[in-house]
């Protein structure tokens, strides 16, 4: 099992999508393992329980992804949470997202992983991820071209729906948890739960 399928159980209520894995993620076979930003946002938005009450998580946050996405013992979402990246190649581990090249084969394989996960909601982590993901659906692409020029309240919200298998799946855009300078990011993540 690799880190691109490890955190997709086959039936996930909500799936978060990043761009590509980092060196640290590939080495430790997990995601968001060096800093607590993502986990704190999920906690503050109501996706997961207070991690400090459950375990004393310290650097590197290697156990978090397993507990949240695989075991589900920290998830407050009944249908479960999942995670994957658009790029499913451990050789592409650049931290500078502008240097990452997404090919059509990456998007095709992402769609296959999403079909297997059967999510009701997809959460795109940041604008760069969204720029690539909307290539899968012309209606989402048109709406994103307008939304991304608007204020944060418009940019980071429900973008629309995409057909995956026979289901209509809601697609949300949120600020990237680690490098985006936006304050109170958890407020944008809360929109996914409404």
Image (cartoon, helix red, strand yellow):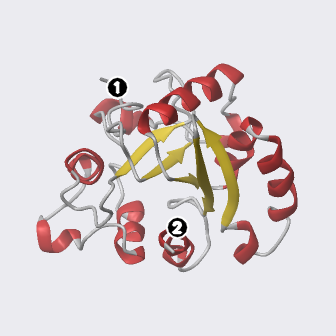
| Residue displayed at 21% across by 68% down | 51
Residue 154 in the image, given as x and y percentages of width and height: 75, 72
Q: Position of residue 105 (x, y in %)?
A: 65, 19
Q: Which mark is residue 143?
A: none
Callout 2 secondary element:
helix
The numbered dot on residue 2 is: 1
As drawn, 9 above or below 36: above
Q: Is residue 65 above or below residue 73?
A: above
Q: Quadrant of residue 47?
A: bottom left
Closer to the observer: label 2 or label 1? Answer: 2
Q: Which residue is mark 2?
A: 192
Mark 1 element type:
loop
* Contact, mark 2 vs mark 1 (Cβ under 8 Å): no
10 Å crowding of disc 1: few (<14), some (14-19), many (20+): few
Q: Position of residue 99 (x, y in %)?
A: 69, 34
Residue 100 position by quadrant = top right
Label 2 vs 1, first from the N-terminus: 1
Which residue is rendered at x = 69% and y = 29% of the image? Answer: 101
Query: x, y percentage for residue 91?
Result: 50, 21
């Amino acid at each position: 099992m690799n880190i691109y399928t490890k955190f997709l159980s086959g039936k996930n209520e909500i799936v978060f999508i990043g761009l590509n894995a980092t060196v640290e993620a590939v080495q430790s076979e997990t995601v968001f393992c060096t800093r607590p930003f993502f986990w704190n946002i999920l906690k503050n938005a109501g996706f997961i329980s207070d991690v400090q009450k459950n375990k004393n998580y310290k650097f590197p946050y290697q156990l978090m992804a397993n507990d949240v996405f695989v075991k589900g013992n920290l998830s407050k979402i009944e249908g479960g949470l999942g995670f994957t990246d658009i790029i499913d190649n451990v050789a592409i581990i650049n931290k500078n997202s502008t240097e990452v090249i997404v090919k059509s084969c990456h998007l095709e394989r992402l769609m296959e992983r999403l079909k297997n996960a059967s999510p009701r909601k997809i959460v795109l982590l940041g604008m760069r991820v969204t720029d690539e993901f909307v290539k899968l659906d012309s209606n989402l692409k048109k709406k994103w071209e307008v939304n991304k020029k608007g204020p944060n309240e418009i940019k980071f919200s429900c973008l629309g729906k995409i057909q995956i298998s026979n289901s209509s799946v809601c697609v949300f855009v949120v600020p990237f948890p680690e490098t985006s300078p936006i304050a109170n990011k958890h407020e944008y993540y809360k929109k996914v739960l409404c």
